Each structure stands twice: as C-alpha cells, then as structure tokens.
Amino acid sequence: MIYLDNAATTRPAPEVVEAMIPYLREQYGNPSAIYSLGSSAKKAVNQAKRAIAGLINGRPEEIYFTSGGTESDNWALKAVAEIYSSKGRHIITTKIEHHAILHTCEYLEQ
C-alpha cells in the first residue's frame, strides 16, 4: 500500500512510539492536575517544550501542544485576528482552503 494522506495523519517513527509508551500506559495523568500522576505528566510536557524550543531557538513558553490541525488552525487564525483587529477586519481566503480555516473565518465574520 502507498499511503498518500500524511498531511492528515502520519505513522509515528518507532522511536517516538517507544518514547510515548510510558505516557500511554503508566504516566497518563492530566498535566494540569495537582496529583502526582499529573505532576509527572506536567514534568514530561515541560521537558518536551524545552527540547522543541532548543531545536528552533525559541523559548519553552512559546511552545503549545494542540490536539491536531483543526485546533491549531482555529487558534492561530483567531489569535491573529484579535491581535490585528485595530488594523482592520479583513481576512482574505479562497473556497479551496481547508474547512478548519473556512469555518473559523465564517465565525470571525459574524
């Protein structure tokens, strides 16, 4: 089989799967919670943020994890619209844009 939908989802590399196993089986706590399982998860999330920030010469507080592309598109578009709202209320897109962008533009239009 030749898989051509990697923009939607991609098989993770074996080392990624291996690194995630502890967090899928034992350390699956809510990183926003105050109990020990959550604290352990928060520590792992913060460590991942530091690692990614180091790769892109950024700061850990600039790294955000989302559940997927749609959430990322919504968040980015709404944030930019809010930041630049004093400069105008115009977003130009096309009908062939991804529905996550189109739906967010429709929401912002109202």
Image (cartoon, rainbow, N blue to C red):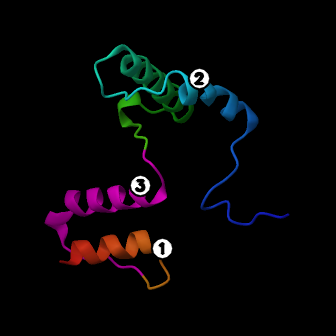
**Dot 2 crowding, Cα within 10 Å, few <14, some 14–19, many 20+:** few
Q: Is residue 86 magenta?
A: yes
Q: CA distance from mark 3 to mark 2?
A: 26 Å
Which residue is labeled 1 in the image?
98
Q: Position of residue 19 (x, y in %)?
A: 64, 26
Q: Is residue 67 magenta?
A: yes
Q: CA distance from mark 1 to mark 2?
A: 34 Å
Which residue is labeled 2 in the image?
22
Quarter of the image with the C terminus is bottom left
For image coordinates 57% across by 32% down, the residue present is: 55
Q: Position of residue 31 (x, y in %)?
A: 37, 27
User: Closer to us: mark 1 or mark 2?
Assistant: 2
- Name the quadrant containing residue 87: bottom left
Q: Amino acid at mark 2?
A: Pro
**Dot 1 crowding, Cα within 10 Å, few <14, some 14–19, many 20+:** few
For image coordinates 41% across by 37% down, the residue present is: 63
Indicate which disc, 1 or 3, sits on the residue closer to the N terminus: 3
Q: Amino acid at mark 1?
A: His
- Name the quadrant containing residue 1: bottom right
Which residue occupies the foreground of this view, 42 or 48?
Answer: 42
Q: How many marks?
A: 3
User: Closer to us: mark 3 or mark 2?
Assistant: 2
Which residue is labeled 3 in the image?
72
**Dot 3 crowding, Cα within 10 Å, few <14, some 14–19, many 20+:** some
Q: Position of residue 61 (x, y in %)?
A: 35, 31
Q: Position of residue 101 (x, y in %)?
A: 40, 70
- Please report the bounds of the magenta region as a residue range: 66-93
Q: What mark, if any, has residue 28 been given in the picture?
A: none
Which residue occupies the foreground of this view, 52 or 70?
Answer: 70
Majority secondary structure in the magenta region: helix
Q: Is residue 47 above or below residue 79?
A: above
